[in-house]
Image (cartoon, rainbow, N blue to C red):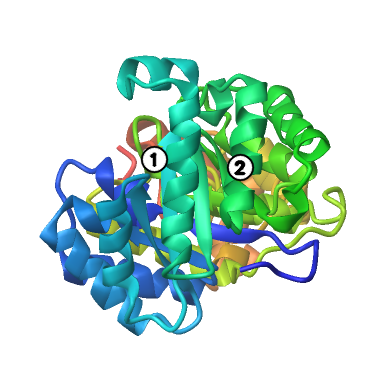
């Protein structure tokens, strides 16, 4: 899938593959289908539906998802091994168009200690895998696993050979989340400068979050020419997870101008729903302070912040909760809230200023908040009528 518009960033979601492989329990075919349909609604371009050769169950769920997706392209993962590629094609063939994603590790440590081969053999295996996959589809992605730690000469040779063999997307994973943004951007730039046939493929990145750099590395990569980002909803994935879909999608949307007009096909209003669904189905709670989708991500607690937000939300909100599909009040009434907040909450509930004494209610509110932590609308309303509640 190559978009003609050079500003369009392809979002490749791997919640059902990299995300699922890191869950303590595997998902049922029905649960995977629910997630795939939600991802399609969200506007994801490519959905990595699983690793068909890994189990009969995975094969079947890849097959059923491939047969129902309408707009998103279904993709399956395979090692650079003939039987994996054949299984992938078999599972995906119900789809009108599909992608085979084949990979092999290219870093010295993986080549030597995991695969126990030399780099020239790895190069041959990668090329054979891409050629085999091309017999089934013209949408073939090749990944150089652990690219972030691969000697740059080897990486350039591998990328060039994979493209020559027919790869239409070449993925550069920072498999162990080791690189920092400037360094990762430098790898992408070097590939564009040194690989002669690079314009024939989409360059993709797949960043893990071991040092908390996954989103920053992915954004840096697109600033250096990558046009596909691989990511997971809620940042799920091996170890510290993958680049989080909602973070890159909103970073690209919010910083569109600074990023030279880049955009994705994501419908931001579907983010909250998809995040909630994935969290529930995977039994993986979203951390409260998680960017974009955490329960605290739009909460304002201190009096100074609340006062600012009541006057102009943009003082402390770079995006609104509504813009990513959340509804409801985001102000937290705590002991750090000021009178403005209390007055606004009472006004919201329909109480006029002359119906209560703000100083008196505020003093009682503070006593209650000191004991209780967060105070809710119904507590405040009770304070108006029940003078003993705070005792
Ligand atoms: O992290 C990684 O390198 C992967 C590959 C299979 C793309 O998940
Ligand atoms: Zn990965």
Tell me the crowding category of disc 2: few under 14, some 14 to 19, or many 20 or more residues within 10 angstroms, Cα based.
some
Q: Residue 307: x and y, percent?
A: 70, 46
Q: Secondary structure at mark 2?
A: helix
Q: Observer-nearest residue: 300 or 351?
A: 300
Residue at (59, 71) in percent of width and height: 267
| Image position of 136 (left or right of 323) | left
Q: Which mark is residue 369?
A: none
Residue at (34, 83) in percent of width and height: 68
- Beta carbon at label 1 within 8 Å of ligand 2: no
Q: Contact, CB < 8 Å: mark 2 with mark 1? A: no
- Exactly how many numbered labels are in the figure? 2
| Image position of 4 (left or right of 135) | right
| Mark 1, residue position | 287
- Beta carbon at label 2 within 8 Å of ligand 1: no
- Tell me, yes or no, if residue 289 can be seen here: no
Q: Where does ligand 1 appear, by image quarter?
A: top left
| Mark 2, residue position | 161
| Quadrant holding the N terminus | bottom right
Place residue 200 in its image quadrant.
bottom right
Above or below residue 337? Residue 94 is below
Q: Observer-nearest residue: 5 or 382?
A: 5
Dot 2 or dot 1: first in sequence order is 2
Above or below residue 371? Residue 117 is above
| Quadrant holding the C terminus | top left
Tell me the crowding category of disc 1: few under 14, some 14 to 19, or many 20 or more residues within 10 angstroms, Cα based.
few
Residue at (67, 28) in percent of width and height: 184
Q: Residue 311: x and y, percent?
A: 77, 54
Residue at (25, 73) in percent of width and height: 63
Q: Observer-nearest residue: 278 or 337?
A: 278
């Amino acid at each position: 899938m190559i978009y003609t518009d050079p500003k369009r960033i392809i979002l490749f979601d791997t919640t059902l593959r990299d995300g699922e492989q890191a869950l303590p329990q595997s998902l049922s075919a029905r649960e995977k289908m629910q997630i795939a349909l939600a991802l399609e609604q969200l506007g994801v371009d490519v959905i990595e539906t699983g690793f068909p050769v890994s189990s009969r169950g995975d094969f079947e769920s890849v097959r059923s998802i491939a047969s129902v997706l309408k707009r998103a392209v279904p993709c399956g993962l395979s090692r650079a091994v003939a039987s994996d590629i054949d299984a992938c094609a078999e599972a995906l063939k119900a789809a009108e168009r599909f992608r085979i994603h084949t990979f092999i590790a290219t870093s010295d440590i993986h080549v030597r200690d995991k695969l126990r081969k030399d780099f020239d053999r790895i190069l041959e295996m990668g090329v054979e895998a891409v050629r085999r996959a091309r017999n089934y589809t013209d949408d073939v992605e090749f990944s150089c696993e652990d690219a972030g730690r691969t000697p740059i000469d080897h990486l350039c040779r591998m990328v060039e050979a994979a493209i020559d063999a027919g790869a239409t997307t070449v993925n550069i994973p920072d498999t162990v989340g080791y690189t920092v943004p400037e360094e990762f951007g430098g790898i992408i730039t070097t590939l564009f400068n040194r690989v002669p046939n690079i314009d024939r493929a989409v360059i993709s990145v797949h960043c893990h979050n071991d040092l908390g750099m996954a989103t920053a590395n992915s954004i840096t990569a697109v600033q250096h020419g990558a046009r596909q980002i691989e990511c997971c909803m809620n940042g799920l994935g091996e170890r510290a997870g993958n680049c989080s879909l909602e973070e890159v999608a909103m970073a690209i949307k919010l910083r569109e101008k600074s990023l030279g007009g880049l955009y994705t096909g994501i419908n931001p209003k579907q983010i909250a729903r998809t995040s909630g669904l994935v969290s529930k189905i995977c039994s993986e709670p979203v951390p409260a302070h998680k960017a974009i989708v955490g329960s605290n991500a739009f909460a304002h607690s201190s009096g100074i912040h609340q006062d600012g937000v009541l006057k102009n939300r943009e003082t402390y909100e770079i995006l609104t909760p509504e813009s990513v599909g959340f509804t409801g009040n985001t102000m937290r009434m705590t002991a750090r809230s000021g009178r403005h907040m209390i007055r606004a909450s009472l006004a919201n509930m329909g109480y006029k200023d002359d119906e209560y004494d703000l100083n008196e209610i505020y003093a009682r509110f503070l006593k209650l908040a000191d004991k209780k932590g967060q105070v809710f609308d119904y507590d405040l309303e009770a304070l108006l009528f029940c003078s003993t509640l705070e005792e």
